[in-house]
Amino acid sequence: MKVLLVSAEVDPFAKVGGLADVAGSLPRALAKLGTDIRVIMPKYRTVRLRAGDMQRVVESLPVLMPACESGCAIDMSYLPDSNVPVYFVEHNEYFDREGVYGSPSGVYADNAQRLCFFCRAALAAAPALGFEPDVIHLNDWHTALIAAYCKLRGLHYATVFTAHNLGGAYQGTFPQDYLDDVGLDLGEPRVHRLLLGGPLNLARVGLGFADVINTVSEKYAEETANEATGEGVADLIAQRGNDMWGVVNGIDYDLWSPRNDGHIAAQYDADDISGKAACKADLQGEFGLPQNPDIPLISMVTRLDAQKGLDLVAELLDDTSRFQLVLLGTGDPQLEALFSEASRTHENIGARLEFSDALARKIYAGADMFLMPSRYEPCGLGQMIALAYGTVPIVRSTGGLADTVHATGAATNGFSFEEYSTQALKGALKQALDAYRNSRRWRRLMANAFACDYSWTASARRYQELYQAACQKAAA
């Protein structure tokens, strides 16, 4: 089967969030299973710095926009350690900029037009490259227009739309007058029904026009059919019925392994965890915390955003006598100020308002516990990485956190709570702190964590099934 995966960001060429991790890892796993998969993305300024040698494969490609004809060039490289081709759409006016979606001063005002161009260029590129896919795999609202163009133009491609995050801020919503800019007409009955005669919502475009749709965990697929979680899209999710899938993301255990991680103080694995103590001492030193081997060390590597449950964590900051807390991340200025002040005034709290892959790895390796009290979490990668490092998660039971962290049974690998409240979080935290003081029980929890297998292989097989379902739906 031939698949063209379209994404606005792909690790390691351009990364804003977890979408890039998926778009950089899933194709490699699919290729190992025999899928002929190619990736296409915009050629941002960061690509010039990170892609290494690129080959120009299309010198000039006409791209018909709603109001004019434009054009682009296509360069090619490969995903690292693979034979998976990555095509880069070069249009300097749209993509040769400081950031992916915006600069420090805010999002780009022409994002709808930029991404419309990318979608149209991706469709034009396939025949120009001599690669006619059976399936076009779309990722998040940035690429949703392709599903509409395929259906409205009668193109033969099957389409899969993966929603990595359906929170209200991640649906690609624009004023109604942007419809002309992207070439959609409310006078077309399918468009009118989909958008309810209202503003342009690109997530709804993808969810409504794609042959098959999915979220990145089974639990989140269920939750998005509820208006409380699937705000603005729940009606569509419910309508799609069996066309809606949940496929949990995976992680690459070659990249995330304390056995061979060169950034951590001492390497270790499930058979010999002695190196984890050295990693803990190193992490405490890195954050200026008392180097006490016996106090539980809780960690967070997170975007500082209301979604991530940081308002609940804020209620814990004045009561850290029984544990230490380290946090790495950037985001909301008010949350940054809150954790910066807590780090300055509390002996057992450390915060770094930055993103550092090397420091993140030290945190995964050196912490005893990993905290993710999210309001909602489509999948989450942090808890799976923590498990790979033998670091026990404490999570709210939502989305992918519920699918991967199990608080009961023989395979218990962490702690969870249901209600979104400080009291519920404190209850789960108390359970974790009590368990930590029982060395035999804690070793068993760590063993269960190490035993988890959330590799991409199982997820890639599910995507192969999903592609087959999309082809059958398109042909019906």
Image (cartoon, rainbow, N blue to C red):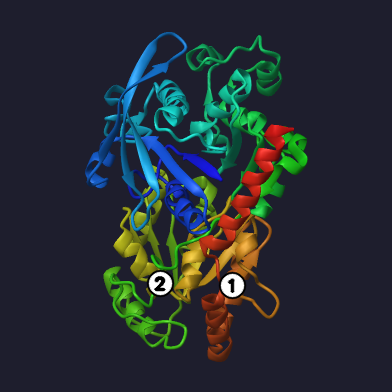
Q: Nearer the viewer, residue 295 or 166?
A: 166
Q: Nearer the viewer, residue 196 or 94?
A: 94
| Quarter of the C terminus within the rendering | top right
Give the crowd class for mark 2: few <14, some 14-19, many >=20 residues within 10 Å: many
Task: Work out whether 331 lies above or below 281.
Answer: above
Task: Work out whether 386 lies above or below 211.
Answer: below
Expressed as whole percent of the image width and height from the top left, the position of residue 335 reads 42, 48
**Is residue 433 found left or right of 274 in the rendered image?**
right
Amino acid type shown at disc 2 = Ser
**Is residue 70 found left or right of 418 in the rendered image?**
left
Q: Which residue is disc 2 drawn over?
A: 257
Expressed as whole percent of the image width and height from the top left, the position of residue 403 reads 64, 61
Residue 245 visible in the current orientation: yes
Quadrant of residue 345 in the image? bottom left
Residue placed farthest to the bottom in the image?
440
Q: Which residue is disc 1 drawn over?
A: 414
- Closer to the chain start, of discs 1 and 2, is 2
Quadrant of residue 189 in the image? top right
Q: Is label 1 or label 2 in front?
A: 2
Identify the residue shown where x is 52% and y is 51%.
35
Identify the residue shown where x is 36% and y is 50%.
79
Residue 346 visible in the current orientation: no
Expressed as whole percent of the image width and height from the top left, the position of residue 181 reads 48, 14
